[in-house]
């Protein structure tokens, strides 16, 4: 890794499974010298620190280079710090780097409230980080982070494997409802329940940016899963279907709820494509059922919302026809 860094050709540096042996200092120093060769203009280097014992001086040096070199992603996993408070303080300085975009903090135990408060403050010092993985760090720490950090500019959040219980807090649905730039939200392997799922489902109604929501391996049962499913595909009426969320791909529902091909396209035209396909599919299903579409249209298009829905209905039929014709003749 040192050799390749010195030649400017290495995109990722992995340091793993080392203790606080003083004999390793020459190797650490060689690594830090090689950081001088990091290209300051490309996409940046990924630095992985895994299963390492770090004393205060080594952590200080690591964070110094994160702040002042082109290191765009940092991964700390199962790291043992001789002084957690000092380590988090140094991390806070590193977070000021305009190059750092992604922090991954996996299984690094923070045992007291004071240190977790300091970690929250450290994360809040960054104006550049917009991707965070905070996994396997415990329920209370995850709650503290959700409550204490402004995630309104983040594009990716992983809060997996924390045994997270909200206890009625609405930080997650509030973030979704705010329609921030958040694109991916991973909440698998927690303890979110039906009430959490219902609140999240409601928040999806006004969100057009979130393209992936993973709620696998929680304690969400039928009521919560149905609420989430209907948030993206409410087929009770055409109006309800049109008002569903057309951007978010759901992961983690049971086999009773078929989310296959629902909101699969994360491209620029995904919203319009998904609405078109859903309306077309519902009309086709109604036709195949034997009753046809006319009785439904007479019932659903007779209210005050009919004018609002009609353009989408006509657009879906025309665009679906044109798309089919194009694909058929190609």
Image: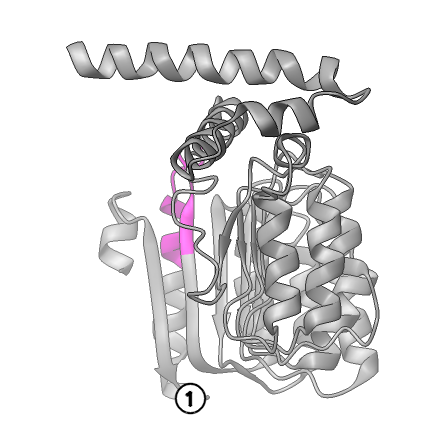
**311 w.r.t. 261: above or below:** above
- Residue 41 lies in the magenta stretch: yes
The residue depicted at 56 percent of the width and 78 percent of the height is 136
Residue 249, position as x, y percentages in the image: 50, 46
* Label 1: how many Cα within 10 Å (few below 14, some 14–19, many 20+): few
Residue name at image x 47 percent, y 67 percent: 254
Q: Name the residue that disc number 1 marks.
A: 19
User: Which of 77 and 187 lies nearest the eye of the viewer?
Assistant: 187
The residue nearer to you, when weighing 283 against 227, is 283
- Tell me residue 89's x, y (percent): 73, 68
On screen, residue 215 above or below 321: below
> Number of marks in the image?
1
Q: Is residue 17 magenta?
A: no
The answer to whether any part of residue 133 appears in the image is: yes
Image check: 311 left or right of 72?
A: right
Q: In this view, does 54 lie to the left or right of 1?
A: right
User: Of 150 and 118, which appears nearest the observer?
Assistant: 150
Of all residues shown, which one is farthest toward the left? 330
Residue 287 location in percent, x, y?
Answer: 43, 31
Residue 129 appears in view: no
Q: In which quadrant of the rendered image does the C terminus lie?
A: top left
What residue range appears in magenta? 33-46
Q: Which residue is drawn at 74% across and 20% down?
A: 302
Residue 27 screen position, x and y as percent: 34, 73
Which residue occupies 38% across, 38% down? 39
């Amino acid at each position: 890794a040192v050799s390749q860094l010195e030649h400017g050709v290495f995109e990722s540096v992995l340091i793993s499974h080392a203790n606080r042996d003083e004999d390793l200092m020459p190797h650490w120093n060689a690594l830090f010298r090689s950081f001088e060769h990091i290209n300051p203009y490309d996409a940046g280097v990924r630095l992985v620190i895994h299963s390492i014992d770090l004393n205060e001086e080594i952590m200080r040096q690591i964070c110094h280079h994160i702040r002042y070199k082109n290191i765009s992603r940092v991964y700390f996993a199962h790291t043992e710090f001789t002084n957690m408070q000092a380590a988090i303080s140094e991390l806070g300085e590193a977070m000021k780097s305009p190059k750092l975009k992604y922090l991954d903090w996996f299984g690094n135990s923070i045992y007291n409230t004071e240190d977790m408060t300091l970690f929250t403050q450290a994360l809040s010092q960054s104006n550049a980080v917009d991707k965070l993985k905070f996994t396997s760090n415990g329920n209370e720490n995850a709650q503290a982070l959700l409550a204490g950090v402004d995630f309104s500019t983040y594009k990716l959040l992983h809060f997996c494997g924390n045994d997270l219980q909200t206890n009625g807090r609405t930080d997650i649905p509030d973030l979704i409802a705010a329609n921030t730039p958040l694109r991916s939200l991973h909440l698998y392997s927690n303890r979110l329940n039906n009430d959490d799922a219902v609140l999240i489902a409601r928040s999806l109604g006004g969100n057009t940016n979130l393209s992936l929501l993973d709620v696998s391996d929680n304690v969400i049962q039928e009521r919560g899963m149905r609420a989430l499913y209907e948030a993206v595909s409410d087929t009770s009426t055409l109006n309800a279907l049109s008002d569903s969320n057309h951007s978010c791909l759901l992961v983690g529902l049971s086999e009773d709820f078929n989310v296959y091909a629902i909101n699969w396209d994360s491209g620029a035209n995904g919203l319009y494509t998904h609405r078109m396909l859903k309306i077309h599919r519902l009309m086709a299903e109604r036709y195949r059922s034997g009753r046809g579409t006319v009785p439904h249209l007479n019932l659903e298009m007779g209210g005050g919302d009919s004018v609002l829905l009609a353009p989408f209905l006509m657009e879906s039929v025309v665009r679906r026809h044109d798309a089919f014709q194009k694909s058929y003749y190609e």
